[in-house]
Image (cartoon, rainbow, N blue to C red):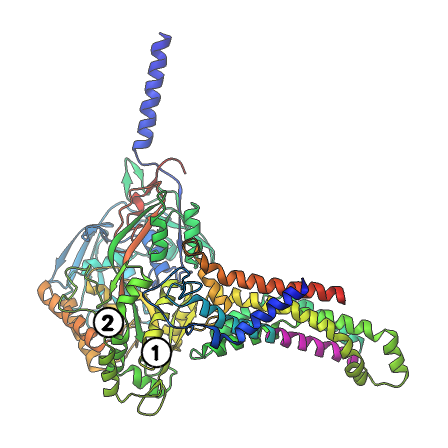
Amino acid sequence: MRRAAAALLILAFLAAAMANFLAPYPYSEQFRDLPDASASRSHLLGTDELGRDRFSRLLYGARLSLLMAPAAALLSVGLAILIALAGVVAGPWWEHGTRAVANLFLSMPWIFLLLVARSLMPLNTAPAAVGVITFALLGLLGWAEPSRVMVAAATRYLRSDFALMAQASGCGRLRLAVVHLVPNLVPLAMAQFLIATPTFLLAEANLALLGLGVPEPLPSWGSLLRELESLGAISANVWTLAPAVLLLLVVSCFHLAVSSDKCVL
Amino acid sequence: MRCSSLVLTLLSLAVFSVAGVSGPRWGGELRISIHSEPRSLNPSLVDDDPGETYRYLTGGVLVRVNRVTQELEPELAASWTAEEAGRAIVFHLRQGVCFSDGTPFSAEDVAYTMQVLTQPGLHSPTGDTFRVGSRPVRASVIDKHTVKILFPEPAADAARLFDQVAILSKQSPLKENAVLGPFRLAEHKPGAYIRLERNPNYWKTEGGRRLPYLDAVRLEIQQNREIELLRFERGELDLLSGIDPQQFDRVAANSKLWSRDVGPSLEGELMWFNMRPSAPLPDFEKRWFSSRNFRLAISHAIRRDDLSRIVYRGHAQAGIGPFSPANRFWFDTKLAAHQFDLHLAQELLAGAGFRKEGAMLKDSGGHAVEFSILTNSGNRSRERAAAMIQEDLAALGMRINVVTQDFPALIQRITQNFQYEACLLGLINVDLDPDSQMNIWLSSAADHPWNPNQPAPATAWEAEIDRLMQAQATSLDRGKRKADFDRVQEIVWDQAPMLYLVNTDALVAASPRLRNLSPSVLRPQLLWNIDQLYFEGSK
């Protein structure tokens, strides 16, 4: 199962990376004689309400979402590792402090900060830049959840035999953290990364549904899901469901990979 | 005996039940939606659609334009006469009318309302429509039930302007919450809903009972149109107006719901550029936007027919000017929509010093032509129109960024801090007479879209529009007024400060249980006779 999930994820990433070659049309090209068209040989998943090829937009949307969501996850998990290692160097007060701050942070409605940040962006920010900034904000705001896990793990490792032996041998806290603890934290960080990636994919989709995601004409999976706002459009053309199905598939694959990783861990 | 009494009982029951369904039913709550929080519930400061709806439902006016016949009808004023060669209107008020809190209504209240509206510091959009010349409109109380409105210059058809003027109470401690309309404010949860209850002192009666038939109106604040439609289909909302064409097609296909395409409305989608000299924009952008050639080129590069066909599913016509052909008298029949002509657009741009370098259009200073079109989030038709314009203008080498923001943030940008480049919105015509557009066309008006509150007209053509609008507003000769306003429409067509994209059809739907509906192309399309609406059966 894990292999199948990994294979599907690799396939999706490859398709996203090669969107320029695989997409039959530019993502913004409007075939105005064919709005809301059903699937056909020339448009494999039909066209959207402005006559844009849905398959091409799905590929280009995957490029943005599948590259930026892992990048945001990497950012948040990287911050979490740094916080955990800082705790090893600083001592127990850091652990208590970061736990309190993380709990407080998780209780805050950060969606509003995202909305405000989006409305404060200069109006002429390029769509791709808006996408990058949106995911970067998601990554920066996503540190709390993985940091709680990473700090707890670092504290546990600090009390383990190998860490005590290293300290007894005169190993400094900084060296202990970087040389001995980081390799032990990597599998956990990997699991956190796999959990965070689909979370950020869905977060961007939520922002897009509010009309505050990646602006036109650049597609993201979130913006493609906006077609699903209209029940009439779905019933008239089931191909509008394609982005939702693909998002579901990719998120499920990530979760399958995590489940397997947890067993391994 | 038994048999005959049974027959009598059945007969009386039958008569009772027939009588019960034949007459209007009293009571019930009408649930409708508004798409954002009204910026102000003060009737003098209303400048948005939700605020207009609230004012229409609560405000009592001296006269009302019948939205179907388009004729003026008496309301709080039983009659009125024009005097002093059109410089004055004398309103004879109804007697025995009280505000919702029981405060008696008198001529003093009308004078007080006019005084509030014309306060220079208030910047009341309604007050702007009364601007004739530089001197203010004054109200003079003749007796308790007679008031004279004095205009500094002759004002044509000025009585129609009072359709928008909700009378305030001078005496009531409730101030603007004391109302004369069919409903009064009962509860307001900001961001969620406004609940109105029947005004117990409403002056209209039916069969000895005070109207309206309905007990309450609940205005749900619902920004998302799709959720609004779902709630309507589930019966949680009772009527929809200004429906998205795609949604209208869906409602029309449902035989259990009542829907109508009332035909071309006076409303349209339009786009304008920020031409305010003090706007926080680079100087070269200000030069683009103030260039007639630039604006006209963009207008000629937009495929309006595609907008009508694709975005509005055929429920729209290419926009021409301030009024659609639906306004038979005031529409200038000499004008036609700017036709799509890419070659002409390129020539106009070349004439203004723009040139294409590679795929990008650049101005004479070498700046790539890139600007944003701001529109409100949640309106899919508008967002789709913006995406189509973005594609159309790409053919000229322009890079357009479509930006969607929530409505309050957008209004803040276009009216207060002017941090925008171009804006795509709809303008609502509430009246057929051009006088109602004084707040749009006068360069000194607060709602002059592209450069509001000008101390003096920034351009010669704006000065000409000011002069013509003032002239038509003070002339009593309907033919001359028409000629003046035709000239205004021609200047606007020629200078293109606002690009008229499409005029949308009036699309409405309602619960099949709602009675006395009389849809109109004028706003509020289904609510204009709110005091006559009732539900069939109990609610």
Judge the density around disc 1: few (<14), some (14-19), many (≥20) Cα neighbours within 10 Å: some
Looking at the rendered structure, the number of numbered marks drawn on it comes to 2
Q: Which residue is mark 2?
A: B441
Residue B230 appearing in the image: yes
Q: Is residue A158 magenta?
A: no
Residue B171 appearing in the image: no
Judge the density around disc 2: few (<14), some (14-19), many (≥20) Cα neighbours within 10 Å: many
Give the Cα separation between the discs numbered 2 and 1: 31 Å
Q: Is residue A86 magenta?
A: yes
Give the residue type at disc 1: Ala
Q: Nearer the viewer, mark 2 or mark 1?
A: 1
Return the residue nearer the eye: B127 or B367: B367
Quarter of the rendering containing residue B504: bottom left
Return the residue nearer the eye: B246 or A263: A263
x, y (%) of residue A209?
A: 48, 63
Q: Which residues are magenta?
A: A72-90
x, y (%) of residue B428?
A: 29, 62
Q: Residue furthest bottom?
A: B365
Return the residue nearer the eye: B431 or B519: B519
Give the residue type at disc 2: Trp
The answer to whether B286 appears left or right of B147 in the picture is: right
Q: Which of the image's four quarters has the N terminus of chain A?
A: bottom right
Q: Residue furthest top?
A: B1
x, y (%) of residue B53?
A: 34, 56
Q: Chain of mark 1?
A: B
Q: Identify the residue shown where x is 24% and y is 71%.
A: B441
* Secondary structure at numbered mark 2: helix
Q: Identify the residue shown where x is 30% and y is 84%.
A: B288
Q: Which residue is mark 1?
A: B394
